[in-house]
Amino acid sequence: MAIQDILAAWAKGKAMNAAENGYPTKTPFARYLVAPGDMADKAGAVLPISDERHIIVDGVVSKLGQRKPAHYEIVCLHYLSRLSDRRIAKSIGIGPTSVRGMRENAEYWIEAKLDT
């Protein structure tokens, strides 16, 4: 699984459990109920990751936030808020090429930490 797919699955898992009142939006059992054709038949569908893997990825992304807050912000805006590099660049005030470079740098760092 590519790091982009892992981060997309991590973001999907965070979004599933992120509610305004702090309560999960879906029960753990309901997360695994998939309508026929929802996951396997769609091109580009995000496959779920295990809870253990989600916790590990969340920890590594949190460490990124401690070490490189700007990179962490870009990763969160890209994967959690699903913003393009251009929109992130506009909101932060730097160029889209810099945003892409910082995002890729963060992805490489996360991937290296997950491999160790």
Image (spheres, grey):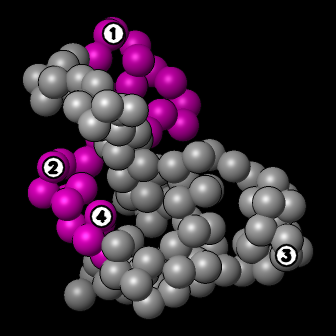
Disc 2 to disc 1, C-alpha distance:
23 Å
Q: Magenta segment, which residues?
A: 34-60
The residue labelled by disc 3 is 94
Image location (x, y in percent) of residue 116:
23, 87
Residue 85 makes an appearance in the image: no
The residue labelled by disc 2 is 51
The residue labelled by disc 4 is 58
Q: Which residue corresponds to the image point at 52% horizontal and 73% vertical from the top-left?
A: 72
Tag 1 or tag 2, which sits nearer the N-term? Answer: 1
Query: Residue at the top extreme?
Result: 36
Disc 4 to disc 1, C-alpha distance:
29 Å
Image location (x, y in percent) of residue 59:
26, 71
Of helix, strand and loop, which one carries label 4? helix
Disc 3 to disc 2, C-alpha distance:
35 Å
Query: Image quadrant of residue 101?
Result: bottom right
Please name the amino acid that badge 3 sits on: Ile
Please name the amino acid that badge 2 sits on: Asp
Of helix, strand and loop, which one carries label 3? loop
Disc 4 to disc 2, C-alpha distance:
10 Å
Instruction: Give yes or no for residue 19 being in the magenta stretch.
Output: no
